[in-house]
Amino acid sequence: MRMGFEEQAKLSQMSLPQVKAHFRQGLQDHGTDVNLNDSQPQGDGDQSRVTAENAQFYRDMFATGADINHYSDIGMLPFCEFAKQCLSGDVKAVRAALERAKNTNQPTPDSLTRLMESRETSLRLTPLLMMVSIGKNMAMRGVSEKQMSVVKLLLEYGARPDARDVCGKTVCHYGAGAMATPMTLEAVRLCIKAHESGHFFGKQVELHSLNSAARNGDQGWCLGYQSDTGRRAVYLAETRETLAVKPENLKLVDALEQQNPTKLCDIPDRMGIVCLQEIIICNREDCARFLLEENHADLDVEDCDGTSPRSMCVQTPLGGFSMAALQGRKRDKNFEFSCSKCGVLKSDTASDVVQSASVSLLSKNGRGNIPSHREGSGYRKPVNVRVNEKFDIKVQAISHRVPLAIYDKSRHCNFEVAPGSPGFDELLQAAQAEPTWQGRKTFVTASFDAEGNCSVILVNKC
């Protein structure tokens, strides 16, 4: 059952302990072993597959950030000190904390694991997951460089790039999905590279094929990933020295542990969803190129509804690009798209078939109806968008009785359109006409004029 806006408003009035209890009960009611999660404060907990009947609860939990805004309202005070240092981009403090935790005789001390893998919020986010989720759940502008430095530090000291939240989401779902930013895409790029050799971490490895033949055959413990060089740190216990070694020059001492890990971008969440599905429907070609051309993401991972990125490509604008990438070639500049329903070419469609209409969305009080605690709430243009400049917004719909949720990727523009309001019927119809997401949401182009009024451009599809 989808979370209605009345329920969201009710949640906004709850205290943090109350909303945490609400999500804990919701997780338990929808198939999550919360006791198993409690027993793994630094682990992924219950990652069992979610049934189609329970999937919407987890979709809503991920989409809204669960209780992250309640934490934000009180300055993240309940977070551990290390998590707050990471979020604030305090590179010096983060490095000092990691060094203190590292200062033991163990190659991968428990103190370091507790620091980097402890979970925060009802979504159970590690510090690394929180850093990448900033682009989706919180607006913290101006510190991207510091954030990237923290991400690199976490990977260097051994943070798991494949950690999963309570919904099974990885850094790819948070940082390379519909709400991706340049910072989160770069962070995901580093995590994907680290994950490729992540199966070595914390295990005994043997050095081989080195230019320095005297080092070949040496054994040690594999440590964190050095993002700037693409190497792994290896601690040699006999000589008590640490080397930086390329992953291709490492092999596990225990041959039975040799493995080829699944690509990080191909790891599905508990509903079977990979991040590629989200970006196909929202037409994020930058993310599609990142996933398909750079990382060769799998197009055939099916979710709990039997939907795969390949099946979605048939009915979306990115379909031609995705199929071209699958065949190992870049899309030609003259590549012609055709409608999957009527076969009309894009050039014909633009001039003869598709008709667009501008619909005004007026707000009586100029701020919309989303509760005030929601980050970036309001009937207003995003901060970095100029007057009359077009930008994309997401429309989430339930039925003709329930308000529509409207927001852009930054969440600075974030409001509702109530039944009977200008534009409600047109937007509801547009969402219900979208087959890929079962009529639950769509993406449209919007703009704000000099007087602060919002208009959306609706395209009549064949």
Image (tube, rainbow, N blue to C red):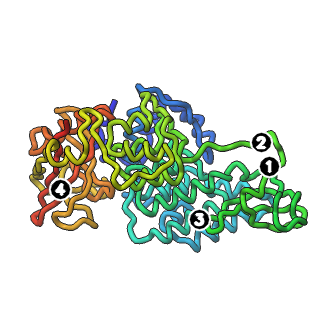
Residue matched to label 4:
367
Q: From mark 1 to mark 4, how far is it between C-alphas? A: 58 Å
The answer to whether 212 is drawn above or below residue 412 in the figure is below
Q: Secondary structure at mark 4?
A: loop
Q: Which dot, 3 or 4, sits closer to the camera?
A: 3
Q: Secondary structure at mark 1?
A: strand
- What residue sits 22% from the left and 52% below the top? 445
The answer to whether 349 is drawn above or below residue 180 in the figure is above
Task: Give 204 or 285, whichever is nearer the viewer.
Answer: 285
Q: Position of residue 359 (x, y in %)?
A: 11, 49
Task: Give 12 or 164, whichever is nearer the viewer.
Answer: 164
Residue matched to label 2:
257
Q: Position of residue 43 (x, y in %)?
A: 62, 44
Q: Which mark is residue 252?
A: 1
Quarter of the picture holding the N terminus = top left
Q: Position of residue 409 (x, y in %)?
A: 33, 55
- Please name the amino acid that badge 3 sits on: Lys
Contact check, label 2 and label 4, Cβ < 8 Å: no
Q: Position of residue 341 (x, y in %)?
A: 26, 32
Q: From mark 3 to mark 1, how far is it between C-alphas? A: 24 Å
Q: From mark 1 to mark 2, how far is it between C-alphas? A: 7 Å
Q: Which dot, 1 or 4, sits closer to the camera?
A: 1
Q: From mark 3 to mark 2, how far is it between C-alphas? A: 27 Å
Mark 1 or 4, nearer chain start: 1
Residue matched to label 3:
152
- Please name the amino acid that badge 1 sits on: Leu
Q: Secondary structure at mark 3?
A: helix
